[in-house]
Amino acid sequence: MRRFEYHEPMTLEEASTLLTTLGEGAFFLAGGTDLFVEIRERLREVRHLVNIKRVPGLDRIDYSDTGGLRFGALVTAGQLEASEAVIAHYPNLRAALRQLASIQVRNRATVIGNICRASPSADTIPPLIADGASVETYRIGGGRSIPMAEFFTGPGRSVLEKGEIVVAVTVPAPMPGSLRAYIKHGRRKAMELATVGVAVSLDTAGGVCTGARIALGAVGPVVLRAPLAEALLVGSKLDAATVAAAAEQAMQECTPISNVRSSAEYRREMVGVLTRRAVSQAQEVAA
C-alpha cells in the first residue's frame, strides 16, 4: 500500500476546501468498502484521504408524509435497509438494499458512496431514479439539488464539480395508490453485480395508471429511464397486454453491451422479462 496523507475535517466547508486545494489524488472516506480495496490493489492512486466521519449531521435519516425521505452521506446501506420509513413506503429501495453485496458490507458501506461511484450496475440507483430522488450537494458559495436522473454522465462520472460534496439524498413521499418494485438479475444471489436491474414506480387512481417511471440498470452507460415504455402504461389499467407492450418498448430503449457477465442480446431480453415481472410484483405487493 502506498503512503498517503490523512485529513479529518470537522465541517463541510473544511472538507470542501481540502478537496479543492489538495488537487489530484484526494479522496473522501465515508464507508471505504470500495476505496480500501482499490488502494490495496493499487487500482487508485490516493495521495490524500479526507475522512468526513467527524462532520456532524451526515448520519441522519428523516421522513415525513409531506417532505418524503432524506438520508445523509454517512448513512449505511444496513441502516437504511432497517429504517421503518423505507420498510413502510419504499419497497423497491429496500429490495435493492437487501441485495447489495453482503450483510457485512451493508453495515459499513454508505448508500451515497454507492451512488457516487456512478456504476450503471449499482443496485441503489434504479429505484431512487424511479422514485424521483434528488441529490443535495454542498459547495462553498452555495450547494444545489440535482435530480438523480441528471446526476450521472457516464460510468464512474457525474456532474459534481471540484470541491462539491454530496451531503444527502431526498426522495419524494409516495402518492396514495403507488406501486413500486425492484428486481435484480445476476449469476448468483449474493455478492453479485447486477446483470440487469429494473425498478418501477407507478401511480394509480381508480385502478388506472396515472404516472409511470421505469429505470433500467446495467444496460447503458448510466442507469436509463424508458420514457416511451412509461407512456404506454399511463392511462391503462396495467392489463397483461399493455404491460407486455411496455416491456417490449423498454427493450428497445436500452443500450446494453456485451462483457464477461452477459451478452448484449441476453441483457436486452432480460429487460423485457424483468419489466413485466416488476410491474406484476408491484401490483402484488400493493394488493
Image (cartoon, helix red, strand yellow):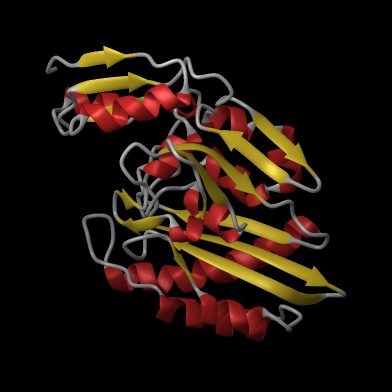
Question: Which is nearer the eye, 284 or 169?
Answer: 169
Q: Quarter-wise, where is residue 207 in the image?
A: bottom right
Q: Position of residue 257 (x, y in %)?
A: 26, 67
For the point 19% across and 26% down, the residue is 46
Instruction: Give the mark count.
Output: 0
- Most extreme residue toward the front, as rendered? 141
Relative to 97, say whether 5 is above or below.
above
Q: Quadrant of the N terminus?
A: top left
Q: Quadrant of the C terminus?
A: bottom right
Q: Position of residue 213 (x, y in %)?
A: 60, 68
Q: Position of residue 42 (x, y in %)?
A: 13, 28
Question: Which is nearer the eye, 249 or 150?
Answer: 150
Question: Which is nearer the eye, 183 or 202?
Answer: 202
Relative to 136, say whether 104 is above or below.
above
- Most extreme residue toward the right, as rendered? 206
Question: Which is nearer the eye, 11 or 100?
Answer: 11
For the point 31% across and 73% down, the residue is 265
Q: Position of residue 32 (x, y in %)?
A: 36, 25
Say whether residue 155 is left or right of residue 143.
left
Relative to 276, say whether 198 is above or below.
above
Relative to 214, say whether 33 is above or below.
above
Say if residue 31 shows up in the picture: no
Say if residue 155 shows up in the picture: yes
Say whether residue 118 is left or right of residue 53.
left
For the point 27% across and 13% down, the residue is 6
For the point 43% across and 44% down, the residue is 115
Q: Quarter-wise, where is residue 52 in the image?
A: top left
